[in-house]
Amino acid sequence: MSRPPLQALQNFVTAARLGNLTRAAETVNLTVSALSHQMRQLEQRLGYPLLLRQPRGVRVTPEGQRLLDQVAPHLDAIGQAFQPFAARHDRVLTVSALPSMASNWLVPRLGRFVAAYPQIEINLESSERLTDFARQLQIDAALRVGAGQWPGLTAEPMFDEWLVPMASPALVQQMGGVDGQPISHWPLLGDPDGEWDRWFALVDDMPPARYVAMLNDSEAHHRAALDGIGVALGRVTRARLLLDSGQLIALSPHRLKTRWSHWLVYPPRSATHQGFLAFRDWLHAEAAEHALHMRTAG
């Protein structure tokens, strides 16, 4: 027996699911007459009817339903397996970033990129999971934090991250103002990485004997600070919008550099992607402006 007509089977699945030849024809980029002819040829090949034509569409016959049940899952699986290998287009760009980095730093700036490059469609994948470029072939680049060592990938530095004590206006008022009391006397939100110890060493002071709460997530720190629970040793990049809007107040001019930085990371295949190269240049310009702001901010 000759090979099964895969395109005709795919079009049959589309028509059966939509229940309408006109809509199915539009979906598969055929005329209605061409699709109808293709369905008749498939029925003649199999020897039984698949679709019953009705005034307002088509209905799957019992034989057609059995074929649909057998064929559709396999065609769907092929479509899913092929998706990562879809042809790359220089005007379509996919970037991965941590949710906090995406919402607090990249997205507020993204309008400038869209305005400068309206011909490029940018897709932002926000995820806590580390991108596997070998498997996730649709992702062109990622914004990561770390030491910049990812084997097989190009890692370009964007900017450093800094920590500063920050609190809600309500807590600041309760404590008598920013300079009302030494930081060690405020209710502090601790973390398991010892960053407060490093900050107090920076300012030549002693950390408190206890913290009001221990939090191991930066977003939880910022949220607790916003709610007035205590003082967060917050990440300036992620809290920038909160600081600029006055929802959080920096309590000290002293900032502590973290042990890691922000990086643009990409696989070798992206080095010739024109859309990515435009994004890369734009991103580094934005990062340089941000770094300058961090150096000159009080």
Image (spheres, helix red, strand yellow):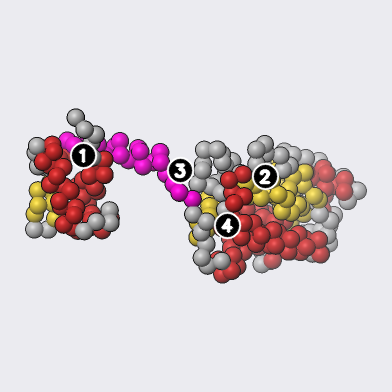
C-alpha separation, residue under disc 4 versus residue under disc 2: 16 Å
Graded by Cα atoms within 10 Å as few (under 14), some (14 to 19) or many (20 or more), the crowding at tag 1 reads many
Residue 115 image offset from top left, x and y in percent = 56, 69
Chain-order first, disc 3 or disc 1: 1
Q: Secondary structure at mark 2?
A: strand
Q: Which mark is residue 21?
A: none
Q: Secondary structure at mark 4?
A: helix
Front disc: 4 or 2? 4
Q: Which residue is mark 2?
A: 154
Give the farthest residue toward the right: 204
Magenta highlight on residue 148: no
Q: Which residue is mark 1?
A: 68
Residue 241 image offset from top left, x and y in percent = 65, 62
Quarter holding residue 55:
bottom left
Q: Amino acid at mark 4?
A: Gln
C-alpha separation, residue under disc 1 versus residue under disc 4: 42 Å
C-alpha separation, residue under disc 2 versus residue under disc 3: 21 Å
Residue 176 image offset from top left, x and y in percent = 79, 63
The answer to whether residue 50 is left or right of residue 254 is: left
Chain-order first, disc 4 or disc 3: 3
Q: Which residues are magenta?
A: 66-88
Quarter holding residue 282:
bottom right
